[in-house]
Image: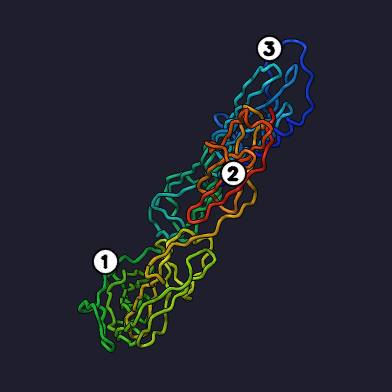
Amino acid sequence: MRCRAVAAAVVATAAAAAATATASPARAEPTAFDTTPPTIFIEVDESPGTGAWAGWYAEPVTVHVYATDNLGVVTVDYELTGAQTGTGQTDQHGVALTVDAQGVTTLDVVATDLFGNTAARTYGIGVDLTNPTIAFGGSATDGRTIRRGENRPLTITCTDVPTAIKSCQARIGQERFGFGEPVPTQANGTYAVQVTAIDAVGRWNERTFTYTVADPLLQVTGNPSITGNPTTARVGQTLTATGGTFAPKATRVDYHWQVGGESVGEGPTYVVRAADLGKRISMYAVGVRADHDDGTTPTVGSVLAVAGALEVDGQSIVTGTAHEGGVLSIAGPRVTPQPQNIANLWTIDGAVVETDAPRLALTGEHVGRRISCEQVHTRPGYADVRTPCRFADGRTEVSVTGNAWTVQAPAGLTGRAKVRKVLRAVVPQLSGPATTHTYQWLRNGKPIAGATGSTYKVRKGDAKRRISVQVTASTPHRPDVVSTSAAKRVRR
């Protein structure tokens, strides 16, 4: 979108320059034959880049283009290609063009004098709007704990696009840190590696790598288990934990029980509660030893607390229109016994969005997306029940349609309305992006047969008539937007 906006700005500047050239006073006819072409001037601030990066800038840059001639310049035509695009025409007084698209933009200029002599010049401008990036690698991990005495190398990579890195340095405090070296782990504490990167045009970035040195970790050598390795358990049943070994040997082993991933107590045994029905029971062990950080085993077991079942009568029905600005609402089925909670899960293009409300307000962000939903009914002591939604026409999924974009600036024309000259269409500016544009050129408001391109070469039959263009902007899932430019009267 940004490149299009820049191109539009360049076209608008060119149109203004062309209008200025047309309004200039007529020059006297020359009295002698002239074979000397004009001289083209391209003025731009000095580049901060050096060497291979001379001509590159760290910010948008303004280029002044003009031409001189011993008898007078008629037109100066220019074209921007590459990272930024656009065309235009001005007179000998020139035009100021702002290049603000990242990358290399080529400026081609052609100047024409009163006798038709031409001169051409090409100039390249590089723009780097991106700061350098800094990446960390190796076995040392940013923000993590490293055990005292461990060997953890840290690699540092500085990169830049579209230019190159000029400087990349790292320090720990006041000391230089060599890329790829192990980070210091001799003493407990928190440390920071400060990295600074500078690119070829002077843009820079800083990033800090932090790590904490701590006591050695008690290593797990064997996982615990739940006696009998059950898959289900009844309310009131006692589950027993056993095992869990560490190196060096732990002086104490604690067992931690979880239900549905939540901690519910410690000890070698656990009695299943009514509140656990429909949830998974698991356990992990923690080994304790002096001068070591505690060692924690993986969580083991997935014991389902056996529960009753909810009975469902009917379906989850969605009402409302799947259109921008509309609201979709879910009416649930009858569930026995009555659930304590109903979760409404809306799926948008395959991604689930959970909300407590059975309503989804549709905005412009939903246009073109596929919508479906389901409800999840829950009650303590019962397994969850999921009921997929049905829309009014029986479908399980709908696509959202949108309103037409509004015209913020109508279609326009550039070029001279003169026989054998070329007029160019300027697409309208809309409140949102259009996917495609189609064109129909009009003569005195009526379609010109076969004139459906973005340009139109003025014909003899167009003389003294008014030429305009009708641009149709199309966007998926939205109505087309039609905009007609102001007309230009054709001169012979």
Q: Is 138 above or below relative to 236?
A: above
Mark 2 surroundings: few (<14), some (14-19) or many (≥20) residues within 10 A: many
Q: Tell me what residue is drawn at x 26 percent, y 86 percent.
A: 234
The dot on residue 221 is 1
Report the front residue among 103 and 356: 356
Q: Is 12 above or below relative to 402?
A: above
Which of the two marks, 1 or 3, is nearer to us in this view?
3
Question: Residue 56: in sight, yes or no?
Answer: yes
| Residue type at tag 1 | Thr
| Residue type at tag 2 | Gln
Picture quarter containing residue 121?
Answer: top right
Kindly report the distance in space between the C-alpha atoms of the residues bearing marks 3 and 2.
43 Å
Q: Earlier in the sequence, mark 3 or mark 2?
A: 3
Q: Tell me what residue is drawn at x 70 percent, y 34 percent.
A: 17
Quadrant placement of the C terminus: top right
Q: What is the secondary structure assignment of the residue under circle 2? A: strand
**Residue 421, horizontal then vertical, whole percent:** 63, 28
Q: Tell me what residue is drawn at x 37 percent, y 84 percent.
A: 334
The dot on residue 35 is 3
Report the front residue among 377 and 257: 377
**Residue 123, horizontal then vertical, whole percent:** 60, 27
Report the front residue among 341 and 435: 435
Q: Is 150 above or below relative to 274?
A: above
Mark 1 surroundings: few (<14), some (14-19) or many (≥20) residues within 10 A: few
The residue that label 2 is drawn on is: 470
**Residue 13, horizontal then vertical, whole percent:** 68, 37
Picture quarter containing residue 67?
Answer: top right
Q: Is 250 above or below relative to 206?
A: below
Kindly report the distance in space between the C-alpha atoms of the residues bearing marks 1 and 3.
93 Å
Q: What is the secondary structure assignment of the residue under circle 1? A: strand
Which of the two marks, 3 or 2, is nearer to us in this view?
2
**447 displayed left or right of 76:** left
